[in-house]
Amino acid sequence: MQQVTIHTPVGHCLIEGDGAGVSKIWVLDEPQQLSAKIPEELGEAVSQLQGYFAGSRQSFTFKLNPAGTDFQKKVWNALLEIPFGKTVSYHELSVKLGDVKAIRAVASANGKNPLWIVVPCHRVIGSDGSLTGYAGGLWRKKWLLEHETPPVQQSLF
């Protein structure tokens, strides 16, 4: 398994994977030594994440290989369908997955998402529009949502 640590505007990010794909991407609360060399298997992930933070990328195409239960993977696949700049509620996600009563299970799977940013768990909010639970901290969730939906410039004339 290869690893690389990169800088992002919301903290250092650790990426882990191999030839089968990227298995983990997570934000670190404490600064870590940045990687001087990027393993070939992780090069595309690093490049695409840097593009996302630079504002030039809205989706990711590198190979993913997260470990999880079948249910967790079903939830993570549903998260991949949330468009850039959009949000859904836990309730809406549960309905989409076919069980309105599964809100807690969906929220739990969402919280165990091992692929920060790429599987966009930050796009799931409370039914009332509130920012609810985020493993990386609510301030990061807010930053990411604002990054994906910048204010529209109003015309003065």
Image (cartoon, grey):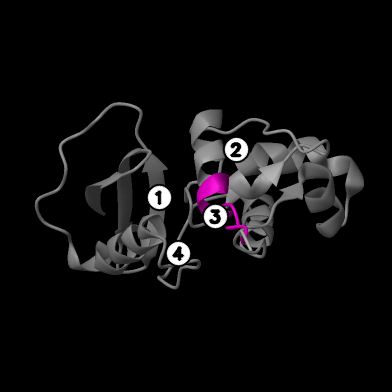
**Mark closer to the chain start, 3 or 1:** 1
Residue where numbered disc 4 is placed: 64
**What is the number of callouts on the image?**
4
Comparing 87 with 103, the one in front is 87
Residue 24: image tag? 1
Residue 111: image tag? 2
**Viewer-nearest of labels 3 and 1?**
3
Helix, strand or loop for disc 2: helix
Comparing 24 with 147, the one in front is 147
> Which residue shows up at 64% across the image and 62% down it?
77
Residue where numbered disc 3 is placed: 148
Residue 60 in the figure: left or right of residue 131: left
Residue 74 in the figure: left or right of residue 57: right
Could you tell me the amino acid type at mark 2?
Gly
Per the picture, the main secondary structure of the magenta-coloured stretch is loop
Q: Does the magenta run of residues contain 59? A: no
Helix, strand or loop for disc 3: helix
Helix, strand or loop for disc 4: loop
Q: Counting other residues with Cα less than 10 Å from the Cα at mark 2, is it few (<14), some (14-19), or many (20 or more)? A: some
Give the farthest residue toward the top.
30
Cβ–Cβ under 8 Å for marks 1 and 2:
no
Could you tell me the amino acid type at mark 1?
Lys
**Mark closer to the chain start, 3 or 2:** 2
